[in-house]
Image: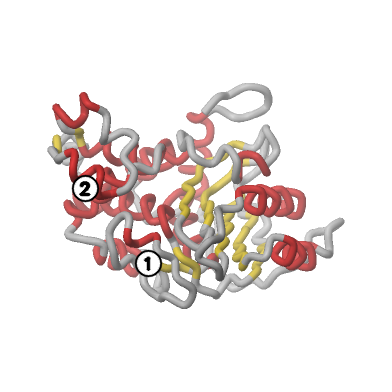
Amino acid sequence: MGTTGARPSRRAVLTAAAGAAVAGIPLGGSTAFAAPRGNPDVLRQLRALEQEHSARLGVYARDTATGRTVLHRAEERFPMCSVFKTLAVAAVLRDLDRDGEFLATRLFYTEQEVKDSGFGPVTGLPENLAAGMTVERLCAAAICQSDNAAANLLLRELGGPEAVTRFCRSVGDRTTRLDRWEPELNSAEPGRLTDTTTPRAIGRTYGELVLGDALAPRDRERLTGWLLANTTSTERFRKGLPADWTLGDKTGGGAYGTNNDAGVTWPPHRPPVVMVVLTTHDRPDAVADNPLVAKTAALLASALG
C-alpha cells in the first residue's frame, strides 16, 4: 500500500496497532449505537441503502477512540465466504508456526487442486506449480489475492475447516463457523448456518487479531501487514473510504450476490475504526454489488470519522 499524502506508512500503522494492543483499547463490549454528532440518521440511511439495492445488509463499525458503534443486523448470520481466510492465516501463525520455522515449510500441490478450488491466481502460476510454495507465501496469497487453493492448503495443514471454528472459539468468538472447503463454502443459500458469521462476531474477532492480544506481537504484525497489502477491495471499502484513511481488510464473495468486506481502517492522526459490511440477496441470480459496500463504507466513515 502506498504512503502518499497524509496516509501513514505501513510501519506507522503496525506500530500503532501494537500500541493499541498494549494500551488495551476496548474492542468488544455491548455498547448500542449512539448516533454520531452531525449524522443522527445513519441507521435510516443504512435501511435506505438496503432497500435501494434490494439486499440484506449487515454492519458493524466501532470507533476504538470513543467506543461508539454502528450496528445494523449485527446479530444476523451472513455467509462468510473468503473473509474466513484471515482467520485461517491467524490460526496458522498462532498454532502451527514457531519463530518462522513452519512459515518456511514448502508445500507441494497439483494443478488439479488449483482448478478444483475455483480460484488460484498465485498458486496456479507455472513456477509455483513446479516448485511449490512456502507456507508464508501461501498465507500472503490467501489474504492479499484471495487465492482459494492457498486457503485450502492452509486448511489442510490446520486439520480442516473445523480448525477455524475452534480458533474462533479460542478467541471468544462463539458465533463464527467454517464447515466446508473452497469453493463449496461460498454457496451462500439463504438460511444456511454453515460457513457463516455475524457482523458483530467477525468485527470483534478482526479487532482482536489486529488490535488486541489474540496473537503474539510478531504474528499480529505479519497478519496486519498482509491485510494492508490486500489487492481485492479497490471497488469496495477502498472506494468508499477517504483516500487518506489507511486500510487493512479482507473481502469475500459468493453465490446469491454475497459480497463482504471486513477489516480495520486508520483515519489520519487518530485511533483506528473496525469496520464490517456483509451483504447478500435472496435470489440465486443476484450479482455482487460493489457499490453497496462502497456506499456503506462511505456512510460509516462520515458517521464515525
Label for residue 270? none
The picture places residue 103, in percent across and down from the top left corner, at 21, 38
Judged left or right of residue 292, residue 157 is: left
- Residue at x 25% of width, y 44% of height: 115
Task: Name which residue type carries label 2.
Answer: Leu
Task: Name which residue type carries label 1.
Answer: Asp
Mark-to-mark CA distance, 1 and 2: 18 Å
Compared with 104, 278 (above or below) is below
State the residue in front, 232 or 63.
Answer: 232
Judged left or right of residue 110, residue 226 is: right
Residue 120, quarter of picture: top left
State the residue in front, 95 or 242.
Answer: 242
For mark 2, does the 10 Å Cα neighbourhood hold few (<14), some (14 to 19), or many (20 or more) residues?
many
Residue 233, quarter of picture: top right
Compared with 19, 34 (above or below) is below
Which residue appears farthest toward the top when viewing the image?
4
Residue 81, quarter of picture: bottom left
Pointer 1 residue:
195
The picture places residue 42, in percent across and down from the top left corner, at 78, 62
Dot 2: what SS? helix
Dot 1: what SS? loop
State the residue in front, 247 or 233.
Answer: 233
- Residue at x 46% of width, y 34% of height: 229
State the residue in front, 283 or 78.
Answer: 283
The answer to whether residue 196 shows anywhere in this view is yes
The answer to whether residue 22 shows anywhere in this view is no
Which residue appears farthest toward the front when viewing the image?
285
Judged left or right of residue 65, residue 216 is: left
The picture places residue 244, in percent across and down from the top left corner, at 67, 33
Q: If you read the primary sequence from the N terminus, does the residue marked by circle 1 or circle 2 appear first?
A: 2
Pointer 2 residue:
153
- Residue at x 67% of width, y 23% of height: 5
